[in-house]
Amino acid sequence: MSSPSMAAALHRRPRSRPPLEDEDLLSEIFLRLPPQPSSLPRASAVCKRWRRLVFDRGFLRRYRQHHRRSPPLLGFFRSDYAGISYTPAMEAPDRVPAGRFSLLLYDSRARILSCRHGLLLFARSSGNRFLVWDPVTRDQHRLVAPPPFDIYAAQVDGAVLRAAGDAHHFQVVLVSYQQKQVIACIYSSETGVWSDLMPTSVQRTAVGCQGMPAVLVGDSLYLLLSDGGITVILEVDLNRQSLALIQVPLSMLAYGHHRDYMTLARAEGGGLGLLWKEGFTAQFWKMNAGCDGVSSWVWGRTIKLDKLLSLNLEEIKRIQRIAYAEENNVAFLRTVSGVFMVQLESLQFSKLPEKNNCAICYPLESVYAAETSIGGGHGGADQDMIVLV
């Protein structure tokens, strides 16, 4: 039999709270909600307590960190004669109105170089000055690059990324095309300094493929460039801080530099991939590392574009790839009928409702949690994001 003191202790033991009243457990449940823009607003509508939990700043940081490698494709930015604008890509209730990411640049010649991990990299018109902007948090970071990356003196490409497992710091990679060499440099927001210059020799003056942003695969960035009229791939190894040139498949060399026909992508199952359009078909290639350490290209699937997109032959001839969303593995294809988004593994596609004539766009893949309903598509815009350049 239990003693009176033991019975009293058992009687005084606090009862466990029901799961939906345990705030720690609730936070863990909310953390695992899908990263769609409508998820947290829907949960917040249940009661004031849930609203306080899901829009706590500490929870929102954890939520973005938890989903940072599986973000939704919110929309895309583009540059044209009217400036830099944002176009939503999702349907209601997840559609984020364009006004939420509106942008005013006091620099009419600023241009976008990269959009990755929810960050945008801008080249400013003042030589070697650059800007990193987070549309969701509105954070801005101004950078002054080393002299070889003066956009007045050389063609410069760039990329922005967050380090694996780090949601606070970012890296900027700049590539400058010089006479008979390519130079790269890496900036770390954690240290606040630029790396040593990384040069590699080319046959002539290399030219970057404008409108073909770098693709991040593993610990390397890959860019297309034209070296002496032949398209090659530049690899920037972020860990070793080194450069290497990779040849494209031999069957493509005869075509030279045709940006409408060749684009880099992540291959199915991981690794570097190459999407090649020839006539009315698209071919997928993947780079495989052999047992002897020598890499080679392997031909994968072939897709009949006219059957996939239900377009006539004349429309297929004029297809251009204008963007690639890495995390979702989605290609943006511009046709005379509009812009299509094609998921490269499932081949599911959708057509953007707007008639879009942009030549290049930059997909925004990010976790966005609005504090109010966002499904209207026109109203509810936040105050303009003003970036002083």
Image: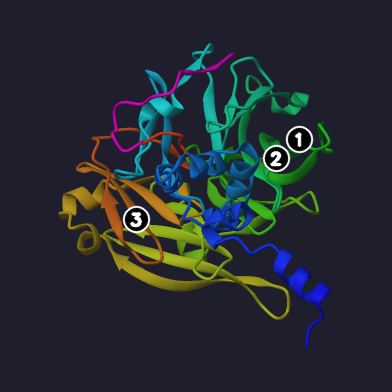
Q: Which numbered dot is residue 19? A: none
Q: How far apart are the two marked residues, 1 and 3, measured between alpha carbons?
A: 34 Å
Q: Nearer the viewer, mark 2 or mark 3?
A: 2
Q: Horizontal placement of 288 versus 350: left or right?
A: right
Assign a secondary structure to mark 1.
Answer: loop
Q: Which numbered dot is residue 189? A: 1
* Residue span colored magenta: 374-388
- Per the picture, the main secondary structure of the magenta-coloured stretch is loop
Which residue carries the number 3 mark? Answer: 342
Residue 378 picture quarter: top left
Which residue carries the number 2 mark? Answer: 170
Q: The disc labelled 1 sits on which kind of residue?
A: Ser
Q: Nearer the viewer, mark 1 or mark 3?
A: 1
- The crowding category of the residue bearing disc 1, from other C-alpha atoms within 10 Å (few below 14, some 14 to 19, many at least 20), is some
Quadrant position of the C terminus in the picture: top right
Confirm or deny contact between disc 2 and disc 3 (CB under 8 A): no
The residue located at (35%, 32%) in the rendering is 97
Q: The disc labelled 2 sits on which kind of residue?
A: Phe
Confirm or deny contact between disc 2 and disc 1 (CB under 8 A): yes
Residue extending farthest bottom: 1
- Residue 269: image x %, image y %? 53, 71
Q: The disc labelled 3 sits on which kind of residue?
A: Val
- Residue 76: image x %, image y %? 42, 37
Residue 374 picture quarter: top left
Q: Is residue 34 visible?
A: yes
- The crowding category of the residue bearing disc 2, from other C-alpha atoms within 10 Å (few below 14, some 14 to 19, many at least 20), is some
Q: How far apart are the two marked residues, 2 and 3, measured between alpha carbons?
A: 28 Å
The residue located at (62%, 27%) in the rendering is 139
Q: Horizontal placement of 173 versus 304: left or right?
A: right
In front: 151, or 91? 91
- Residue 268: image x %, image y %? 49, 68
Assign a secondary structure to mark 3.
Answer: strand
